[in-house]
Image: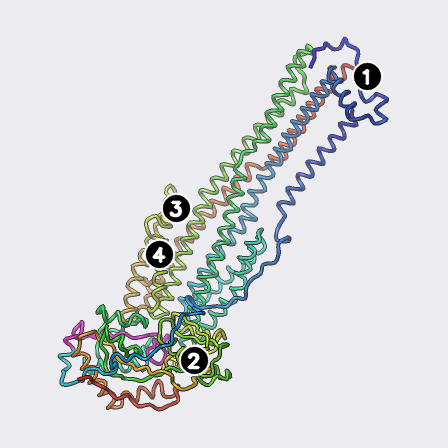
Amino acid sequence: MSQQRNRTHRTRLAAAAAALTGLLLAACAGPADMEPPEVDVPTPLPAGIDFSPEVTASVPDDSCDPLASFAPGAVTADQARAQLDNDGQISIGISQSTNLLGYRDPVTNSLAGFDIDIARAVATALLGEDPNIKWVPMTSNQREDSLKEDRVDLVVRSMSINCGRWENIDFSAEYYRAGQRLLVTKDSGIEGVADLTADHTVCTGAGSTSGGNIAAANDKAQQVTVPDFNDCLMLLQQGTVDAISTDDTILAGMAVQDPTLEIVGEAFSVESYGIGVQKDNTDLTRFVNAALEDLIADGTWANSYGDWLEEPLGTAATAPTAVYRD
Amino acid sequence: MSVQSPPAQAPPAPASRNPAQSDGPAPGRRFDRALASLRHTPGQLRGLLAVLAALVLGAGITGMTSILAKSAVIEETTSQSGRLSVAALQLYQALSQADATAASSYLSAGTPSDEMNETYRASLRDATVALATAAGEVKTAEDAQLVAELNTRLPVYTGLVETAKTFNRLGEPVGATYQEQASTLMREEMLPAAHDLQDNALGQLSESRSGAEAFPWAAAALAAAALGTLVWAQVWLSRRTNRVFNLGLVAATVLLIGFAGWLTMASLASASHTTRSHEEGAVPLELLAQAEISAQQARAEESLLLIARGEDEEAAKRYEAHIEELVASGGLLDRLDEAFADDPELSAAVADAREAAETWNAGHGTVVKLATEGSYTEAVEQAVGDEDDSLATSFDALNTSLTDATEVSADRFIEATADAHRALSGAAAGLAALALAALIGTAIGIQLRVAEYYA
């Protein structure tokens, strides 16, 4: 009997020991028996990037003569000023983030660029030396609404004149003629839009007309859209895309930031920049057109073009000739 | 059991002395013999001893292991899953802070202050240390995956920030794009991963906590059964032997009562401290951390909005959402007020935080108005300058109040956890000793009676 009891005792001890070991093991079970995690290579992408945007080739809109604005006539600065929201101050919608056109320099904090020069010259003509200008930075898709909703008097922000926009706002005469081209790395071998193959990706801004223009010029290239075209430059530098396509003025602003990039090919679209004016502020539009004629005539236009765009674009240019409807 | 009167009867031959035993009897026969022996008092006494020994030993082992398990769990809240949840929280905070600092130093026109550089580097250090700690503490494949994802993205993030800084120094606008890109990576991939890791760790912690708070019912039931049997055995023995007390069994009874008392007290006290550590420590700590994170994220979005020259509607919306999380009614500050209602030190800190957050939010409106209405330079100056009325000053004040409250709250958590641990100190060894002593008492008490049959 005592032997038996001894045995049961030993069994119990063994059971207790086993239970304790089990507890300890449970506490220690850790990463040792886990498969190593698998992680995709992280590729930083901008928010809202679309690798398969819906693009339809753009067709020319002949429903109106978009470039025909209102002739300056004999309108006076007083008459034009009467149509400003705030007599003595003009509010102008611009970009602060488009290099060479409208850009806020982070070091000097000054606002500068071709669009800014034009806007400043027009404001000076309207309000006199050292005009009181309220600069209103906006995104490209805020341009029409800000005029329609009376938030700004003028928009000078690389805005192409077209018939669709004429329905909502008025335009000045054309003050610059840009065209869509390609920005690529110098060793890419791409020399124009025709060289793009189905293996190439082209970056454009979402909601812009650039995508439709590429599709019209080359329907093989894969398009990638981003909400802000500035993201395209980073994607090109990181090798995520092979080319950027938008107005050559904007491409010039990117090209000057990186000596390994170049603008190639002939322009495959016509982008006529005009100053946006609120609908029916016709006197203001007429006065702006007069001011544009003056700043072209007195060399302001040529100076500004020389300061900002001539070298990056590699060509001399002359101001477009104004066309009027009346 | 049939009633027989000892010791007049001749003792039957004990089973073990049966010569057939050595031949290895069939189990059925052995069982019959055991049953037969139970018809006689010494056999009954041995049977009783076996039952009592099993109950006392069972109570002792379950009591001891349950206390050890509780102790381990409390240890864990301060160590393993505790360390994981603290690391995950620190990671989340450090990453938010790194992003807020990187974005606002981008605004400081090329040369951010030494203080900003220092804050950015310190928060990167905190993030990497927290990641290393978390990597050592993860227990599930899912958590290991999250840690790996964060680990692969952190160098990409810092690369983007450094590229942004370089372009910014060169005055090239594309720097802003890199900075936005870095923040997008942080916002859309890294912070959600850190948040998931924190959620998982807190989930594991609250599982452990319910384990630590649970009453050891099995041990208590066994102890009660052992006590009951012991009392019944003494009544039965005193009837059978006409002796009122059996000293061994009385001692065992007293020891078992002590055992049950200690088990109950230690478990209840530890559970109440654990609950306190959760309610007064862990819950407010988590709320405070969330508040800090919301503030950092709002600050990052505010800077992004200004970096984008006011041309980023999404950043504006995200700023609003983060500020809402903080100051809206029922938001984080309201919940902190509730949690700290009866703690003047902490509720004062929360009141300071609220004041700073409101000043900041009001100032934010002015700054955005300045930026979008043409006074960009002034807007940036007000946002990142060090004047008393700048947004940076309000933001720092908010951050300081929340950090102060976090320190106090962390102390409370550590105190309560230590109390919970202390309530259990020595309990496992003590319970084991009591159970063992009770077992010996029982054995001696019964063996003495058995011996009388062979005297």
Q: Chain of mark 3?
A: B
Q: Nearer the viewer, mark 3 or mark 2?
A: 2
The residue labelled by disc 4 is B323
Q: Contact (CB < 8 A) between labels 2 and 4?
A: no
Instruction: Quote the CA–CA distance across marks 4 and 3.
Output: 24 Å
Q: Residue at x 24, y 80 (%)?
A: A64
Q: Is residue A320 above or below residue A170?
A: below
Range of magenta residues: A81-106
Please say whether residue B393 is visible from this viewpoint. Answer: yes
Quadrant, the C terminus of chain B: top right
Residue A61, quarter of the rendered image: bottom left
Instruction: Quote the CA–CA distance across marks 3 and 2.
Output: 69 Å
The residue labelled by disc 1 is B13
Residue A53, image x and y in percent? Answer: 41, 70
Q: Chain of mark 2?
A: A
Instruction: Quote the CA–CA distance across marks 2 and 4.
Output: 47 Å
Crowding near the residue tagged with mark 3, few <14, some 14–19, many ≥20 C-alpha atoms within 10 Å: few
- Viewer-nearest residue: B15 or B351: B15
Q: Chain of mark 4?
A: B
Instruction: Quote the CA–CA distance across marks 2 and 1.
Output: 109 Å
Residue type at the position of mark 3: Glu
Instruction: Quote the CA–CA distance across marks 4 and 1.
Output: 88 Å
The residue labelled by disc 3 is B345
Crowding near the residue tagged with mark 2, few <14, some 14–19, many ≥20 C-alpha atoms within 10 Å: some
Q: Is residue A24 left or right of residue A265?
A: right
- Secondary structure, mark 2, is loop
Q: Earlier in the sequence, mark 4 or mark 3?
A: 4
